[in-house]
Amino acid sequence: MALTYLLFQIVISLLAIAAFHLYRKLTFFKRRGIPHDPPHPVDGNMQGRRTTRTNHEIFMAYYNKYLDSKAPFVGFYFMQKPAAFVIDLELAKNILIKDFSNFSNKGLYYNEKDDPLSAHLFNLDGPQWRVLRHKLSGTFTSGKMKFMFPTVVSVAEEFIRVMHEQVAQRSTLEIRDLVARFTVDVIGNCAFGIQCNSLRDPEAEFLRMGRAAFLDRKHGNFLIGFMDSFPNLSRHLHLTRTPQYVRDFYTRIVKETVALREGESLKRNDFMDLLIEQKKKDDGLSMDEIIAQAFIFFLAGFETSSSTMAFALYELSRHQDVQDKLRAELNDVLELHEQKLTYECIQDLKYMNQVISETLRLYTIVPNLDRKALKRYVVPGHPKFVIEEGQSVIIPAAAIHRNPHIYPKPDEFLPERFAPEEVAKRESVAWLPFGDGPRNCIGLRFGKMQARIGLALLIKNFKFSVCPETQMQFDPKSFVLGTKGGLFLKVDAI
């Protein structure tokens, strides 16, 4: 009886400690006098996440509520984790660029021991990130892009052949799926040197695994929130996010590719070759690091580029004048380059770049940038607003892109916003699809190149327009901006 009573007392004490710890977390901003919405005890300020609302919608609504508050940041609870939600553009610039040394970490959850795939450049912090970024810094130079350019064009030409076959059978196509199959084949070739054949086989393994890596989760919202809120405890509990079958697939593919190339001295001048070169150095990459970088390169190149292309085609279908202007520029540039799509030709497509930039503003694939304060930070000019040591920071990129004070008529598709003279009028941090500062997206050159090549050949060969089946519905289950139910467009060969 005494033992039972003792155990009961222990359980009650542990629950009391946990409740007090949670109370302290959920009153973090109230005790500091920082404007914020009262948090839900489990969801924080993320109510509806992955069920009824996308992260984009959640962050945008919060940003708009406090946009005119004059506060440089407001309090936000990402589940149970208190975060400084940045409103002021000058503060965003300080965090990303001027005071980067204090905000170089992201504070995202990864578990290097139990889930090596999660320990990639996008997630890593501290010395690990700095060393890896340095090792990979030469991977995405313009010279390396020129080496990969012919491979991307080759896949794009196969894409156009498949498109012609599809258009000959029916005029209405689900374009989101088709561009995803194109980018999977591009990344499969450039990252793994593998002919994925997704364009011919919609059930190809690479395509299925790419989608699974974005949409499938090993745990539900509660445990995902727990990992974000209590990362150290989660690592001790061996919690991981990536499903085991996804880890097994990418681990097997990378190991087989590395073994084949090293065994037969194969060279393809692609991303995998660059990783293998790093592996051979004295302080080079480990196999786990190679697997993780190949994994994130595949996911980032597959999802962001395909989504951007699909959203661009949707807007071009709704704005025929923009599509006609883009096609005219393309024909003029191709004429100067003897009808050959070269690397230099792609760089000359200035209006194409404006169309892609405006697409990424209107449809920002990743809704926010995450940072974490290394030391206590008093916001310049706002002594009452302090970002504490170890506190998370959220910069709501997608919401900033819809700020009417920065972009008048923010919901309209206007590529002219990105004419050089208009860009010069804005802060660089007013456009953040690739981040900014030392932790900007390392693969942005490749992403832009892939999207430009794909769109160029599509616009050259086809006319896109809306049809009765055309609708845009976003998927709340997707962390990035994903569509639900497909994106149907009318496509006519030119």
Image: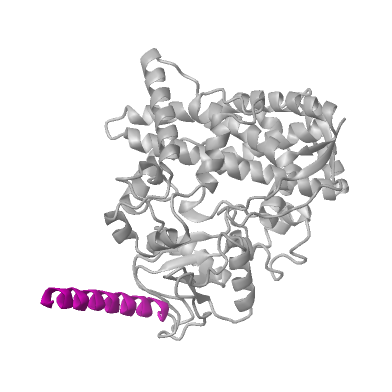
Q: Would residue 272 appear left or right of 66 to someone viewing this image?
A: left
Give the position of the N terminus as an image quadrant. Answer: bottom left
Q: Quadrant of residue 272?
A: top left
Give the position of the C terminus as an image quadrant. Answer: top right
Q: Is residue 472 above or below residue 257?
A: below
Q: Quadrant of residue 15?
A: bottom left
Image coords of residue 455 (percent x, y): 73, 37
Image coords of residue 195 (percent x, y): 56, 22
Asked whether residue 427 appears in the rendered view, the answer is no
Image coords of residue 263 (percent x, y): 36, 15
Image coords of residue 416 (percent x, y): 78, 54
For the stretch drawn in magenta, the main secondary structure is helix
Q: Would residue 168 appear left or right of 148 to someone viewing this image?
A: right
The stretch drawn in magenta includes residue 275: no
Q: Would residue 494 appear left or right of 232 to someone viewing this image?
A: right
Asked whether residue 478 appears in the rendered view, the answer is yes
Q: Is residue 304 above or below residue 109?
A: above
Q: Which residues lie in the magenta part?
A: 1-28
Q: Is residue 162 above or below residue 411?
A: above
The stretch drawn in magenta includes residue 5: yes
Q: Quadrant of residue 170?
A: top right
